[in-house]
Image (cartoon, rainbow, N blue to C red):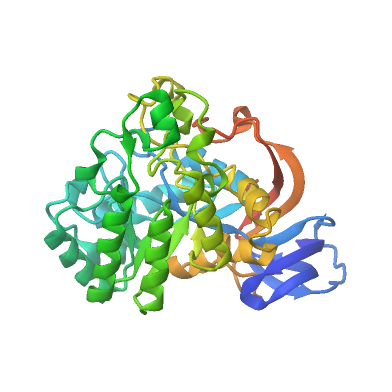
Amino acid sequence: MILRNGHVVDPANGIDGKCDIRFENGVITEVAPEISADGSEELDCRGAYVVPGFVDLHVHLRDPGQTAKETLATGTAAAAAGGYTAIAPMPNTTPATDSAEKIAALLARAKDECRVKLMPITAVTIGQEGTTKADLAAAKAAGAVAMSEDGKSVMDITVYREALREAAKLGLPMFAHCEDKNLVAGGVLNEGVASKKLGLPGITDAVEDVITARDLILAGETGCHVHLCHVSTAFAAELLRIAKEAGYPVSGEVCPHHFAMCDDEIPSDDANYKMNPPLRSRKDMEALREAIRAGVFDCISTDHAPHTAEEKSRGFAKAPFGIVGSETAFALSYTTLVKGGYLDMSGLVRMMSTNPSKIAGHTGGTLSVGAPADIAVVTGEETRIDAADFKSKGKNTPFDGRRVYGKVLATYVNGRRVY
């Protein structure tokens, strides 16, 4: 296969211009300004960007146990439609992914059921109950790329520190969901303009900031690489910056919904706007954008969290937290960050592919000769988000109907077209 006439953007190799790419048997074999025709199938990518496939460090596939919301097949079809070639499913399934056996079973199923590559994450504690550390060494040996208690924090700091110390020895990063459950106090959205307008209990920035500080300090003490998930507040971003300057082994992700929307845009008691962390203030949103511009954040992740329409119809007070993101992330990021002047296209690819690959120890994130042919073909053309067209079972998004720039035309995994 030859992808011809595209604008290739590959930060790992410093490429940002017109190039052709040839791949065969699932591997990239040539990248050059012009590749001679040899009878191979060709795709004319004129007017489009050709980039290393996106890598998502934070998705919820709901499988096993919650398949009315999503399955491995539908979740990875959604990822492929979003330009993703590898995704990391969080362990808060039913039952939790908390052992080598469950990691192995997930990877075995992936061979037949998944369109993109899976990078499993193990729970930190058995059953995600926060009391007994999981067998992290066995989980890593079975294929886990990280550990996380996502959906909550490990509140017992002694158990947590023990896990971080072991993970540091194993070279297993911690993907930290920072939320002090004792401070949530029944909150269902950000404490601010929307909570006051709707008369609903709010979630303060401190809920996130307190645990963010704790986890960054423990990264410095234990030497474990702590990766902050879905940072949503200005102060959490500042804490990450300080920890990096101190030389701590830390990184951080930001989600499109947190830098593309804020709580003053919530129009009514519509739980499609309900997520955790919540949509924050306009000041927080603008601070996240500036932190992206300054290079504080390493990557963009989706926190793709599908729910059924019935669940989301219950309003903020009773509906579950979460929105889908796999099929909107590129467009929202391109529109807000590239069109908005915070990043160039190379910077966006670095945050959506190159850096997350490094954090997870994944072989993607590059279009080097010899690398797997994990490739996305995308454009900056104007389009409209239509939840009815999503491959995901989940349609729960506040961005339905929004006019955006950025469209995925094709996705290849190991040279096979999956979208």
Q: What residue lies at 41% left-to-right and 41% top-to-bottom? A: 278
Q: How many marks?
A: 0
In the drawing, does residue 313 fall left or right of residue 327? Answer: left
Residue 333 seen in the current view = yes
Name the residue nearer the viewer: 242 or 331: 242
Q: What residue occupies the far bottom of the structure in this picture?
A: 247
Image coordinates for residue 233, horizontal then vertical, percent = 41, 52
Q: What residue lies at 18% left-to-right and 52% top-to-bottom? A: 155
Q: What residue lies at 25% left-to-right and 33% top-to-bottom? A: 186
Residue 385, placed above or below residue 231:
above
Image coordinates for residue 270, horizontal then vertical, percent = 47, 24
Residue 69 seen in the current view = no
Image coordinates for residue 5, horizontal then vertical, percent = 84, 63
Give the image quarter of residue 369: bottom right
Q: What residue lies at 42% left-to-right and 69% top-to-bottom? A: 241
The quarter of the picture where the N terminus appears is: bottom right
Image coordinates for residue 10, horizontal then vertical, percent = 67, 70
Name the residue nearer the viewer: 267 or 181: 267
